Image (cartoon, rainbow, N blue to C red):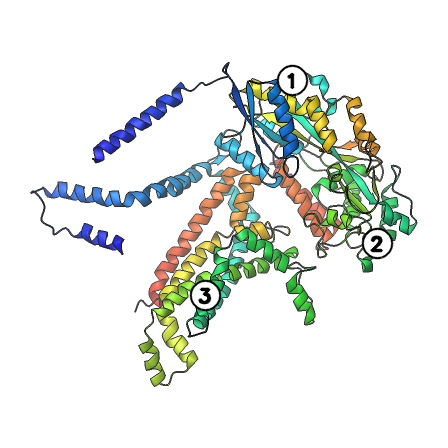
Amino acid sequence: MSLSNAQTSLLDRSRPAARPRTAGSRKRRYALTVLAFLLPSAVPLALFTLGPMVAALWISLHEWNLLSAMRFVGLGNYIDLLGDPQTGAVFLHTLYYIAGYLPLVYVGGLALALALNTALKGRSFLRGIYFLPVVTSWIVVALVWRWLLNPSNGIVNAVLAAVGIQGPGWWTDPAWAMPSIILASAWKDLGFVMVILLAGLQAISPDLYDAAKVDGAGWWRRLFSVTLPLLSPSTFFVFVISLINGFQVFDQVYAMTGGGPNGASEVVVQRIYDLTFRYGAAGEASALSWLLFVVVLAITLIQVRGQRRWVNYG
Amino acid sequence: MNRRLLGLVGVAGAAALVMTACAPAGDSDGPVTITYTNFISNDGNEDNLQTIIDAFEEENPDITVEVTTLPYGDYGTALQTDLAAGTVSDVFDIEYANYKAYQSSGVLAPLEVANPDAYRASLLEAYSTDGTSYALPSSFSTVVLFFNKDLFDAAGLDYPSSDWTWADEEAAGLALTDQAAGVWGDHQPVSFYEFYKVLAQNGGQFLNEDGTAVAFNSPEGIEAAQWLVGKSGTTMPTIEQGQGTPDFDTNLFKDGKLAMLHTGIWMFGAFADVPFGWDIAVEPGNTTQASAVFSNAVGVSATSEHIEAATKWAEFLTSSTTMVDVRLDSGWELPPVSDEAALATYLEKDNPANRQAVFDSLDNVALPPVVAVGQTEMQDIVTEELIEAQAGRKTVEEALASAEERINAVIGG
């Protein structure tokens, strides 16, 4: 609030000047003031985001094991990466993760938000409970899920066995390693999606529902014709954030499977980590980081373009 | 106001620059503080390391040792980051498997060893390149066959001995396995570190003569891999049953539900209080005996400003009598010294009774294969492919062929 006030007063150029100035000096003074306000966020951004990005671009043109001197190889790392079947595999695994995670976390979060938007008893308490995993460390969550999904003595397989289903090998089985990670991730992020959608739901005027009811719309009809269209800005936000986070998925993979078994759950960032810190190929890792950046940028741009078609800002 | 503030910042910056420039750049006559980063004392031996540091500081009042201890799992990453950032300690731990990579990249200072005769010659040589020491061995340990005497007694079987072969181990393992009771006959990790050793026990080679390609995809290699992964589900639990998770095997042994276990002598302390009798034997071989020796070492940073003081500490840490006493008293791996008499007290101790097996295992040592480029990747690939075979997703032949192809692409390139 105070920030937007400051911005308005900055933009308010109709104030009478203390003494007559030329247009040029006033413009410069204005630019300097804006710069001063931007500084607190621009300096960290330049130091900790733009700087490392440029450095990574420079490193990506070299062969470097972190120890010896760097050796310039031009675009060699990029050519190696594009010819390495491992690169395609880690991007596919990442897409697999997103394809499983995004629908699960959105539908789950929406269901929770809808349930907790009603006059349910103890709903503040429940909202807190569902948000708890969001603020819990991934390492703790991953260890708990590894235990829950333990193929030999985990609770999940014990429950499945009780109803006569032979549980899968979860994180010990290449076919089930990624579903295990998706399950844990969706569970952890459910609360975050719920909070965003809850805020969106509360911004929808009850009058609209009353009007829809008068027109004879049932619960599903109201959901699809009133709730979802008016929730679309929140949905868009959830999609953008989740997609970017999805491409950068790492902590849970590192802690739950380490990319295994036999690389079945190795994602892009895990590969970047392994290349840098285990295999001494920081140049190739930096090149892969840039490939990932370009992919995420392209997909985000497409999303921003596409939003005009379906996002309704009322 | 703004200008005044800027001026202040400028003055402070200039002052900082001047002060840095005035700082002593080399060894000075005054007291020095050297830093030492280690993983060897982590998880139980921190006080033992402090005892050695105290003795060193008493002997060298001008030198203070500042120690940082990291868990083994994080150590490699932390060290690489410190080396890349130029913030590495004066003295730091390394493992034998990484020695070649660090030495060839020039981060280790060549060392003038005051008393080379104090060291076991083979260990000192392991950390030398072209006749110059670049690191000093700080300890060594071997892997032996641990066994639960009570389980062997109950089954009426003879204890494992140094003339056992794989066939004897397998027969005993099968006889002692009682899956219904949750008792297993044998356990050996399915990993690179076991594979290169069983390969040697079967007379096979891991690398070719000039180290440019692997040579394990051979009849000996296939038989060795078969021996390792074939235990799973017959004498050893399967992956689904938990095999391969941290501490699974040692906990099973401590619970009295595992008859034989391949692990290192660093477990002596952990098994000291189990409520059953146990002992050790040299690992059985197939065509020949071969045992794994693990050795740690300390290096001095090539960029250290106190190489002389740092070398002094490195040598004290690895060859002083204080170190020998502390290590033998606490059972903290074995001191890398040549003095056999000093090791006599180690043999006199009980539990396990057959401590001679530790030294017997040194007669036939299989050192891990080492390559200059792609060491970690090579190790990861071997472990991954063996687990594929263990889980039954590949045959042993397919797994070794795949490992051969993948590793050659990494180490040959």
Q: Chain of mark 1?
A: B
Does A309 sit left or right of A166 as displayed? left
Q: Mark number for residue B217?
A: none
C-beta proximity under 8 Å, tags 2 and 1: no
| Circle nearer the N terminus (2, 1) | 1
The percent position of residue B326, horizontal first and vertical second, equals 70, 28
Quadrant in which the N terminus of chain B is drawn? top left
Which of the two residues, A60 or B147, is positioned nearer the viewer here? B147
Mark 2 element type = loop
Does B304 sit left or right of A219 as displayed? right
Q: How far, Cα to Cα, is label 3 from label 2?
A: 51 Å
Q: Amino acid at mark 1?
A: Val
Q: Amino acid at mark 3?
A: Arg
Write the residue at 40% across / 52% down: A297
Mark 1 element type = loop
Marks 1 and 3 belong to one chain: no
Question: Which residue in the protein does label 3 denote?
Answer: A127
Q: How far, Cα to Cα, is label 2 from label 1?
A: 51 Å
Q: Chain of mark 2?
A: B
Image height of A186 relative to A213, above or below: above
The percent position of residue B36, horizontal first and vertical second, equals 57, 28
Quadrant in which the C terminus of chain B is drawn? top right
C-beta proximity under 8 Å, tags 3 and 2: no
Q: Mark number for residue B113?
A: 1
Q: How far, Cα to Cα, is label 1 from label 3?
A: 66 Å
C-beta proximity under 8 Å, tags 1 and 3: no
Mark 3 or mark 2, whichever is nearer to me: 3
- Residue A305 visible (yes or no): yes
Which of the two residues, B276 or A252, is positioned nearer the viewer here? B276
Question: Which residue in the protein does label 2 denote?
Answer: B177
Which of the two residues, A185 or B206, is positioned nearer the viewer here? A185
